[in-house]
Structures are given as structure tokens and as C-alpha cells.
Image (tube, grey):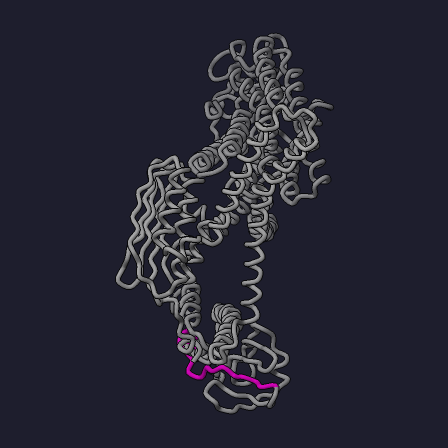
């Protein structure tokens, strides 16, 4: 409908059964076509005006392909109108709405197929499509087309109701209290009412202006509610997410509200036409795109900052271009053409900056370095340097990597000794540089001094290290090379700190082994804390189970002691005796869990057999097991195996919901292997790791303490399998090999 005929908007008045032109909207075009106020229009689109539907609603010819006009002197002129004759209407009513709708449709499909919060995404998609539909239909409703009027009025109100609905759900998503009613569904009556008013306007054309004002009042009412909610929420919670929401909604709506809606309602005119002021509304849906893509609204700040950066540069150039164009060709160009060129230049520059950003990243090897990708080189250098375990080796490797990458021969690490006030290189050569130079330079700073580059690397209580790059005034490091070196300096500084800690720890372990003076203080502290944690957990379990049972028995005995009626005393004593026996069995079970009695007397196999019998009495699954007889030199492993069986079977009882469980202890030539599997509900292994499951983590730590290997494989509704392998004697470490 928008493309069916150019939008011309010629006001007419009926005089003596003729339609005389009373107003011209596009005056420049009318002047070119020799159309003037007072001329008589004889036909539109080669048909009489009495059959022209647009005149039934208003005394305006809104669109036409052809006009036949009689001038005041009686001359007839025939005008064939093309879209390009009035470029403003082509841009504002056809090109921009169509482009916006297609772009919105593309983003809607993208959001629909992207994994996300489904309900939020669906509301966001509906809101964006409704805004685009309202914008596209504005040109059709402006031509007084019946369907266009209904769609425009309905979608105009509906988009704000969807926005209100989206905000209610988004507040819940970011865990912020909603400050308005939760019954949003009632507001969907407003777009239905706007639909009904549109239909009434078609039946009674004379009421169209009044009904249009009612729809604008609905729009204004919803907008005030939305802005009020955001303002109250922002001042109440001072959240950065709500601040961005407030700005992204308020700023685009203000021009449309104050330049079109309010003047139209109050004074039946407007300051800025709807097609121009509504352009600002197009910013609203796209500000929410970042909300859905990033899943966190504060991530928008990065995109807003980048957009602001590009907009400032584009705006400065556009102003420069417009001023230059005005002085060079201002007398030959119309204001509308100049404004169109300026807008096109501005938008093109913003798009160009984004394209350049992508191209720069994809072609960074060509654009920024003839030797390759600096980021890749940085990762490679960090990987090579990070594999060293001694500071001297690390410094040598660091100097070598810098020398190779920057193609310099004279590269070395200079160390200033605060105790001797001497400068030493990693090769042992003495070099004199003024100490003040070393004091002034800061971490990561690269300074050009005489014939060298000096880069501060690391400092501690005794030494200050700097990287020296000799250049002899024959080289000049490029900006990207300096940036690469600065980043590498920060990495190496951390490497040195970590390497020092490792060296000190290994040295301390070496001395401890040689002196055989017991454990390290920090290890004693760690073990003490773990013991206390275990005792606390045991005390909590006893308090919640056995102790509560004992208190209950004591209360019942106290009731019997003070009871006057002794007829049922024997029966109640028998019940209390049964409870005490059960409590003793439970307490004995705790003691056996803490120290299995059969483990020391009859050995591992007997202890495991008893454990399995107890599990079978409680289990709802079929248990298949086999236990090989092991001959282990280290008796500590017997307790570790027992604990592993205990934990695996307890997990099967509590969490697996399995129908069949298998567990096997197998002897190996150099150790043993435990294999467990079930057909239960399973789980996601990554969820176990993230949740730091105490059972799984405890087993892993036990196995790790003996330098064993712990393998777990599980999927949701596909059961779980665990394999544990340990080689006897593999827990012995050669500390000398690591600290020599």
C-alpha cells in the first residue's frame, strides 16, 4: 500500500462542486510541477474525485499517481507522479520502514533460534515485531486505508503492553522487586479497545480524529506507567541495570512524546511530524537485544561505550562535511537534500566503523604485523616461558623469546642488587647504569635511554630486574611491538613470583626430609583444620540422630517414673527397651564407620563382606560384587579401600535410584583396581565438579593422596561408572629431583 502511490498530501476545499487546492505539504515539489493554491483538481488517477475514497475521511488528497489540474486561467495540466519526484516521502514512508522491518525480522529469527531465557526472548521478539509493524503501518494509516488504520492503532498500543509485560518478567530475571501490579493481562484489553476504535472510525469516518486522540491517550497512559515504574525502581534500588533500562526507553520516547503526541492531543497540531519523531522509537527494541544476547543488562555498557565512540567520530566528520557542503554548494542544494546527505553520511560512517572493526580482527596478521599475529605470538611465548621451574631459566627463556620475536641480538635481563649496589646480567657481566634510572621506572614501563630500551620487569626486597634491549639507534619498536612486550612483562612478573614460591616450598620440603623433623607448620595447620571439620560433622550427625533418640527415651522413662497409672508400664518399658537397642545398634554402626573392627582382626575381605551384607539389607537394588584377595605391603591402603567401598555404596543407596549395582575389587600386578557401575539416574559430571560434591571430592582426594587415578563417567538417566586404579609404592615422592 505504501508503494502503490507517492504520498503528496494536498489539502482541498469544495467550492461550487469543485475541489480547489487549499494547502500544499511538499511546496518545493508543487512549485516544480506548477501547482499552486487556488488551482482546481479535476481528476485523481484518471478518475473523478467523487469516487476517491480518501476524500471521504478528510479534505486531503494523501496519495496519487496522476493528477489533472485546471489553472486559474483555464489551462489544463496533466501530472504523472513518481516516487523519486518527492524523495522525502520515499525515504520516510517506504525505505526506512521497510529496512527497519526486515532488520527486525532478521533479529527476531536470530533470537528465536539462539539458546536463551525463552519467555523473555519471546516477549522481546513480539515487542520488536509489533513496534516495526506499527512503524510500517503508519504510512498506510496516513493514507486513511481502513486496514492500515486498524493495524496501526492496535499495534501502537500493543507494543507498550508487551513492553510492560517484558519489564515485569525482566525484573524477576534480575531479582529486582516489581513495583507495579502483577496482573499485566488486564492491560491487553487496551489494544483490543484500540482495535475496536479503529473499526468504528472506518464505519464513521467523521469520528476519526477524535478516536485517534483516544488511542494517543492510551499510548500516553501506558508510557507514563512504564516511565514511572522505571523511575521509582531506579531511585529505590539505584541499580545500574535499571539506569540503562530507563535511559534506553526514556530518551527515544521523549521526542515522540513532546514533539508529536502531546501537541497533537492538546493543540491538534504537531511540532515534528510522526514519521520523523517516530524514528527515535526505533532505538528501543535494539537496546533490548543486548539484554537478551548478554543475559545481563550491565554488559550493554560495553556496547553503548563502543557505539558512543563511533557516533562521536561520525558526528564530527558529518558536521565538517555538512558545513563544507553548505559553503561549496549550499545555494544549489535544498535543505532537505542536504539533511538527507548528512544523515546518510553519518549512518554510513557508523556502519563503516563496525565493518572496519570486524575486518581489522580477521585480517590482523596482515594489518598489524608482517611477522604474524601478535596475540598468537604472545600466547606462544607465555606458554614456553611458563614451563620453566627456576627463576634463572625463566629469565633466560624470556630474554630469548623477546630476542627472537623482535629480531634483536642484544637482549638480556639486568638485575640491580640493593645489598651490593651492583648491576648484574643473567650472564654474569657487570654493567653500570645510574641507580636513579632504575628507581624511576615502573612495572611494565618501557623507556628509551641512550642506546637501549629499558623495561621494568620485577622487584622484591633484594633485587630489581629490568629487560634491556640494545638498539644502537638503528631500530625503533613499533607501537604493537611495545604493547606485546608490555603484556609479556606483566605475565613474566607473575611467573617470577609464582616460581619463587615454588622454589621456596621445594627447598623447605627438602630440608624437612633431610632433618626428619616432622611436618611443616602450614601442613600441621591444614591437617588440624580438617580434623576439626570432621569432628564437627560427626558431632552434628550424632546430635541430630542418636542423641535425639536418647533424649526421647529419657523423656519417656521420666513419664513412667512419675506415672500414677501403672497398668501399661510393662508394655511401655518393652517399647523403650526396643528403642534403646535400636539406638545402640545405630551408635555401634557409627563406631564401625569410624574404625571398622574386622579390618584389623580378620582383614580387608572380611570387613568388606560385612559392609556389603549391611548394604544389601537396606538396598532396593540388586548388588553384584567380587573381591579379590590383595597382598599389600602398606596397611594404610586397606583402610583407604574400605572407605572407597563405603562411600561408593552409600552414594548408591542415597542418590542412584538404581535397580542394579556392580562393584569389584581386582588385583593387579603392581596394585589394585576398583570398578563401580550402576543403572541409576546418573548425573552431569560437570555439575558434580561445579557443585564440589563432598562424596566424590572425598574419594578423589583419597585416591590422589596415594597417587592413584580416578575416572568417572556419567550422563543423566544413563547411570554412572567409576574406575579407580592405584599402584602400590607410587605415593613415594623424590623431593630431591624437584628441588635440586
Q: Nearer the viewer, residue 735 or 616?
A: 616
Image location of residue 605, percent across then percent down:
34, 53
Q: Nearer the viewer, residue 604 or 122?
A: 604
| Residue 15 in view | yes
| Residue 75 in view | no
Image location of residue 156, percent across then percent down:
58, 25
Image location of residue 627, percent across then percent down:
30, 51
Residue bounds of the magenta highlight: 401-418
Does residue 109 show up magenta in the picture? no
In this rendering, is residue 658 above or below 133? below
The quadrant of the rendering that contains the C terminus is bottom left
For the point 57% across and 88% down, the residue is: 433
Does residue 407 show up magenta in the picture? yes
Q: Farthest residue to the left: give it.
A: 669
Q: Nearer the viewer, residue 633 or 554?
A: 554
In the rendered structure, the answer to whether residue 256 lies left or right of residue 426 reads: right
For the point 31% across and 55% down, the residue is: 673
Amino acid at each position: 500500500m505504501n508503494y502503490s502511490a507517492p504520498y503528496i498530501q494536498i489539502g482541498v476545499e469544495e467550492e461550487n462542486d469543485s475541489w480547489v487546492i487549499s494547502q500544499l505539504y511538499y511546496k518545493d515539489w508543487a512549485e516544480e510541477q506548477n501547482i499552486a493554491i487556488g488551482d482546481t483538481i479535476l481528476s485523481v488517477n484518471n478518475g473523478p474525485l467523487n469516487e476517491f475514497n480518501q476524500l471521504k475521511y478528510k479534505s486531503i488528497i494523501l496519495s496519487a499517481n496522476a493528477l489533472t489540474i485546471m489553472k486559474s486561467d483555464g489551462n489544463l495540466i496533466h501530472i504523472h507522479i513518481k516516487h523519486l519526484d518527492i524523495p522525502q516521502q520515499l525515504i520516510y514512508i517506504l525505505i526506512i520502514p521497510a529496512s527497519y522491518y526486515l532488520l527486525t525480522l532478521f533479529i527476531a529469527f536470530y533470537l528465536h533460534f539462539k539458546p536463551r531465557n525463552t519467555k523473555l526472548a519471546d516477549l522481546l521478539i513480539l515487542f520488536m515485531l509489533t513496534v516495526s509493524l506499527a512503524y510500517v503501518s503508519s504510512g498506510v494509516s496516513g493514507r486513511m486505508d481502513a486496514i492500515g488504520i486498524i493495524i496501526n492503532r492496535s499495534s501502537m498500543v500493543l507494543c507498550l503492553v508487551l513492553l510492560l509485560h517484558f519489564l515485569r518478567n525482566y525484573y524477576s530475571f534480575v531479582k529486582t522487586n516489581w513495583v507495579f501490579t502483577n496482573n499485566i493481562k488486564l492491560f491487553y484489553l487496551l489494544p483490543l479497545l484500540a482495535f475496536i476504535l479503529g473499526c468504528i472510525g472506518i464505519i464513521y469516518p467523521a469520528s476519526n480524529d477524535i478516536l485517534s486522540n483516544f488511542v494517543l491517550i492510551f499510548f500516553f497512559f501506558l508510557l507514563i506507567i512504564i516511565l514511572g515504574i522505571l523511575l521509582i525502581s531506579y531511585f529505590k534500588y539505584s541499580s545500574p541495570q535499571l539506569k540503562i533500562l530507563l535511559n534506553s526507553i526514556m530518551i527515544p520516547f521523549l521526542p515522540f512524546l513532546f514533539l508529536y503526541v502531546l501537541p497533537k492531543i492538546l493543540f491538534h497540531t504537531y511540532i515534528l511530524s510522526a514519521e520523523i519523531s517516530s524514528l527515535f522509537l526505533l532505538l528501543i527494541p535494539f537496546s533490548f537485544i543486548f539484554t537478551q544476547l548478554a543475559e545481563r543488562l550491565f554488559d550493554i555498557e560495553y556496547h553503548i561505550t563502543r557505539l558512543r565512540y563511533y557516533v562521536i567520530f561520525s558526528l564530527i566528520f558529518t558536521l565538517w562535511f555538512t558545513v563544507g557542503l553548505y559553503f561549496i554548494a549550499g545555494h544549489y542544494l535544498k535543505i532537505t537534500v542536504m539533511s538527507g546527505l548528512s544523515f546518510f553520511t553519518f549512518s554510513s560512517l557508523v556502519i563503516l566503523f563496525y565493518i572496519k572493526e570486524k575486518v581489522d580482527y580477521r585480517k590482523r596478521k596482515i594489518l598489524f604485523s608482517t611477522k604474524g599475529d601478535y596475540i598468537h605470538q604472545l600466547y606462544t611465548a607465555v606458554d614456553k616461558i611458563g614451563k620453566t621451574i627456576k627463576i634463572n631459566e625463566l629469565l633466560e627463556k624470556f630474554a630469548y623469546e623477546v630476542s627472537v620475536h623482535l629480531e634483536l641480538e642484544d637482549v638480556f635481563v639486568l638485575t640491580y642488587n640493593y645489598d651490593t649496589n651492583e648491576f648484574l646480567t643473567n650472564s654474569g657481566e657487570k654493567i653500570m647504569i645510574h641507580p636513579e634510572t632504575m628507581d624511576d621506572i615502573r612495572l611494565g614501563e618501557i623507556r628509551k635511554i641512550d642506546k637501549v630500551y629499558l623495561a621494568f620487569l620485577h622487584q622484591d626486597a633484594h633485587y630489581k630486574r629490568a629487560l634491556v634491549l640494545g638498539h644502537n639507534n638503528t631500530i625503533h619498536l613499533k607501537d604493537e611491538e611495545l604493547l606485546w612486550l608490555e603484556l609479556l612483562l606483566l605475565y613474566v612478573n607473575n611467573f617470577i613470583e609464582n616460581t619463587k614460591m615454588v622454589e621456596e616450598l621445594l627447598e623447605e620440603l627438602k630440608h624437612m626430609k633431610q632433618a626428619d623433623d616432622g611436618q611443616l607448620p602450614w601442613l600441621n595447620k591444614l591437617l588440624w583444620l580438617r580434623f576439626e571439620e570432621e569432628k564437627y560433622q560427626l558431632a552434628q550427625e550424632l546430635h541430630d540422630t542418636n542423641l535425639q533418640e536418647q533424649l526421647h527415651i529419657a523423656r519417656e522413662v521420666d513419664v513412667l517414673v512419675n506415672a500414677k497409672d501403672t497398668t501399661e508400664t510393662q508394655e511401655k518399658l518393652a517399647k523403650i527397651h526396643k528403642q534403646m537397642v535400636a539406638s545402640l545398634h545405630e551408635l555401634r554402626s557409627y563406631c564401625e564407620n569410624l574404625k571398622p573392627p574386622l579390618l584389623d582382626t580378620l582383614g580387608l575381605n572380611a570387613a568388606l563382606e560385612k559392609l556389603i551384607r549391611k548394604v544389601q539389607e537396606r538396598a532396593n537394588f540388586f548388588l553384584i560384587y567380587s573381591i579379590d584377595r590383595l597382598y599389600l605391603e602398606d596397611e594404610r591402603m586397606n583402610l583407604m579401600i574400605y572407605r572407597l567401598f563405603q562411600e561408593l555404596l552409600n552414594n548408591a543407596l542415597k542418590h542412584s535410584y538404581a535397580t542394579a549395582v556392580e562393584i569389584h575389587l581386582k588385583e593387579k600386578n603392581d596394585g589394585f583396581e576398583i570398578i563401580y557401575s550402576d543403572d541409576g539416574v546418573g548425573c552431569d559430571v560437570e555439575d558434580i565438579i561445579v557443585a564440589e560434591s563432598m562424596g566424590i571430592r572425598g574419594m578423589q582426594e583419597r585416591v590422589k593422596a596415594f597417587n592413584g587415578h580416578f575416572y568417572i563417567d556419567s550422563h543423566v538417566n544413563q547411570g554412572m561408572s567409576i574406575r579407580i586404579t592405584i599402584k602400590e609404592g607410587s605415593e613415594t615422592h623424590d623431593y630431591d629431583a624437584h628441588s635440586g
